[in-house]
Image: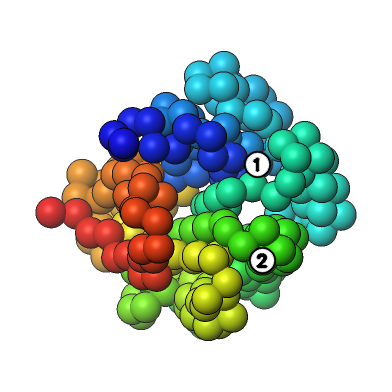
């Protein structure tokens, strides 16, 4: 079976689907025949995505537990069970030193980058285990395994996500459920806009960054491995 058709029949939930890696992933999966449930806060962005690739909007804010649980329950009812694949791609990012990082920003990073993936995983995992199949893809970061100055909040959340993923791998071993942590290097998304990295010698140049589409291609790679093959960790770099 070719890669272009191998995802037909799969239901894939993608968080953070309104922009960046999440949007590129939603488009890539839809183009390969998957039924995509696109989760994000922005109704307008999700409607635009629906027009572009047919993804079904799932409006929810990952920082709102009730909204997430309700949205996921409604999505499960619509598709007849928990998704076959979940891609936790929602994220926030800023650059600030430990000495000047705010508690509010730190909490936001943990809420979206770490607690959000846990919340979604906690919702779908019991159904996947009962079914004996499923794939959870967590979008981490190179900053989740390597320290960079100014990444106090971001690295704390991504190192935490890596830890959560490691425990998940141990707990699902032999169940038929799989999980993969994709850790891309710097990726050129709108999260960099306010930072203007090209004007800051301490930050990577945008021309040297990965594109969201390249990271989405890594997600497709993980999803299209043969039955019984797991890619537990996948570091993605440019060049």
Which residue in the rendered view is the most extreme toward the top? 51
Q: In which quarter of the image is residue 114?
A: bottom right
Quarter of the figure that contains the N terminus: top left
Task: Tell me the element at label 1.
Answer: strand
Neighbour class for label 1 at 10 Å: few (<14), some, many (≥20)?
A: many
At x 52% / y 58%, what residue is drawn?
Answer: 135
Locate residue 221, reporting x and y percent.
32, 49
Up the image or down, 58 lies above or below 237; here it is above
1 or 2: tag closer to the N-terminus: 1
Q: Residue 39 carries which label?
A: 1
Q: In this view, does 22 lie to the left or right of 188?
A: right
Q: Is residue 225 left or right of residue 125?
A: left
Up the image or down, 183 lies above or below 86; here it is below
Locate residue 163, reporting x and y percent.
52, 81
Up the image or down, 154 lies above or below 198; here it is below
Between the residue at mark 1 and the residue at mark 2, the CA separation in whole angstroms equals: 22 Å
Q: Quadrant of residue 14?
A: top right
Neighbour class for label 2 at 10 Å: few (<14), some, many (≥20)?
A: some
Q: Report if residue 228 is visible in the image.
A: yes
Q: How many labels does the image show?
A: 2
Front in this rendered view, residue 38 or 99: 38
Q: Mark 2 points at which residue?
A: 129
Task: Tell me the element at label 2.
Answer: helix
Locate residue 202, reporting x and y percent.
27, 65
Q: Is residue 163 left or right of residue 189?
A: right
At x 34% / y 54%, what residue is drawn?
Answer: 226
């Amino acid at each position: 079976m070719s890669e272009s058709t191998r995802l037909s029949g799969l239901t894939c939930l993608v968080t953070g689907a309104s922009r960046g890696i999440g949007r590129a992933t939603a488009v890539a999966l839809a183009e390969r025949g998957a039924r995509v449930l696109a989760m994000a806060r922005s109704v307008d962005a999700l409607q635009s995505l629906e027009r572009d690739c047919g993804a079904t909007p799932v409006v929810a804010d990952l920082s709102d537990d009730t909204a997430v649980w309700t949205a996921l329950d409604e999505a499960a009812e619509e598709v007849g069970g928990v998704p076959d694949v979940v891609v936790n791609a929602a994220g926030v990012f800023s650059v600030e030193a430990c000495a000047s990082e705010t508690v509010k920003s730190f909490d936001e990073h943990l809420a979206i980058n770490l607690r959000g993936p846990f919340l979604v995983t906690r919702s779908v995992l019991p159904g996947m285990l009962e079914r004996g199949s499923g794939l959870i893809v967590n979008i981490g970061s190179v900053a989740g395994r390597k320290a960079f100055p100014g990444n106090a909040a971001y690295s704390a959340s991504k190192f935490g996500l890596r830890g959560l993923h490691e425990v998940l791998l141990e707990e699902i071993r032999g169940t038929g459920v799989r999980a993969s942590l994709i850790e891309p290097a710097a990726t050129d998304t709108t999260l960099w806009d306010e930072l203007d990295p090209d004007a800051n010698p301490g930050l990577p140049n945008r021309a040297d960054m990965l594109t969201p589409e390249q990271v989405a291609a890594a997600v497709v790679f993980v999803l299209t491995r043969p039955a019984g093959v797991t890619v537990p960790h996948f570091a993605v770099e440019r060049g």
